[in-house]
Image: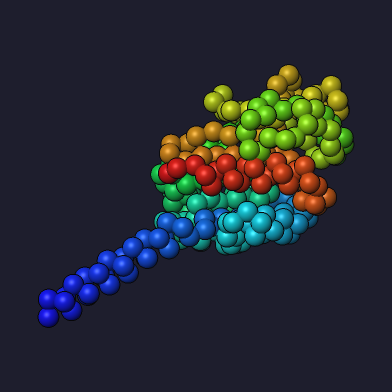
Amino acid sequence: MKYQYTISVLLLIGTVMISAFIRFTKMPRVLVFSKTSGYHHQSIPDGIAAIQKLGKEQGFAVDTTTDSTQFNERNLHNYKAVVFLSTTGNVLGTKEEKAFQEYITGGGGLIGIHAATDTEYDWPWYGQAIGAWFLSHPKQQQATLHIVDGSHPSTRGLPQSWTRWDEWYNFKSINPDLHVLITIDETSYEGGKNGAGHPVAWYRKEGKGTVFYTALGHTAESYSEPAFLKHLAGGIQYVLQQEN
């Protein structure tokens, strides 16, 4: 009997250790949210496909949704980060906003792409968290970007002066605590309104959470552009690697 008891205890310990190993080695999950109540970017399907491909290559699982009711405490607990992919307008209800704010400040990750700053203008916390709000943009055109922090995963390996075509956002209500990664040279294109140091990519902390934002990614072509995908992949990995 004593021998059988010892075996049972060992089996129980082994089961617990295996369960713990599975839990701690489980690949992180990312939720890509692309609901729009304003302008709908035609590049959203390309963005979703690109993030799914990055997930397969870099070891994170990707779920996608336009259903804001998934923003509840129980469901958000399944994700290491949420991607706002060119969301526009008011996309969350009051209860959903509360759940998302608690998720981020409690240690969750937020990755904003392009029109993520054109979202939730009547929710002050969101504007603070994402880092700025969209003001305007000129016509799509080529412009030159400058890497401010080349040590970050999202900028590492990119050219110090990076010339590309996109839709270039001007911002309002810029949070002063941004860690700016990339700026745009307003002398290289027409229509810039933020002057010297015009930010286009940054990260910041919000409570225990981590936020990464890039204004790049308006065009469908962006999501097959190696340099942009390198930038985006680095931003996602940065957020996923942060400790809660």
| Residue 136, placed above or below residue 19 | above
The C terminus sits in image quarter: top left
Give me the residue at 57% from left, 60% from top.
61
Q: Residue at the location (66% across, 46% down)?
A: 233
Q: Is residue 88 above or below residue 27?
A: above
Q: Is any part of residue 75 visible from this angle? A: yes
189 to the left or right of 133: right
Which residue is located at x 74 percent, y 20 percent? Answer: 195
What coloring was used for the rendering? rainbow
Q: Nearer the viewer, residue 227 or 5?
A: 5
Residue 119 vs residue 44, the one in the foreground = 44
Please state the horizontal and vertical placement of residue 159, each as a whole percent of the image. Answer: 78, 31
Give the x, y percent position of residue 215: 70, 38
**Residue at 84%, 21% in the rendered image:** 187
Compare residues 176 and 139 and report the one nearer the observer.
176
Q: Quadrant of residue 157?
A: top right
- The total of numbered circles placed on residues is 0
Residue 49 horizontal/vertical position (percent): 72, 59
Residue at the extreme top of the image, as rendered: 196
Residue 113 can be seen in this image? no
**Quick one: which residue is furthest to the front in this view?**
3
Q: Is residue 164 left or right of residue 78?
A: right
> Residue 43 appears at what percent x and percent y?
77, 54
Where is the N terminus found, in terms of image quarters? bottom left
**Against 148, is 54 above or below?**
below
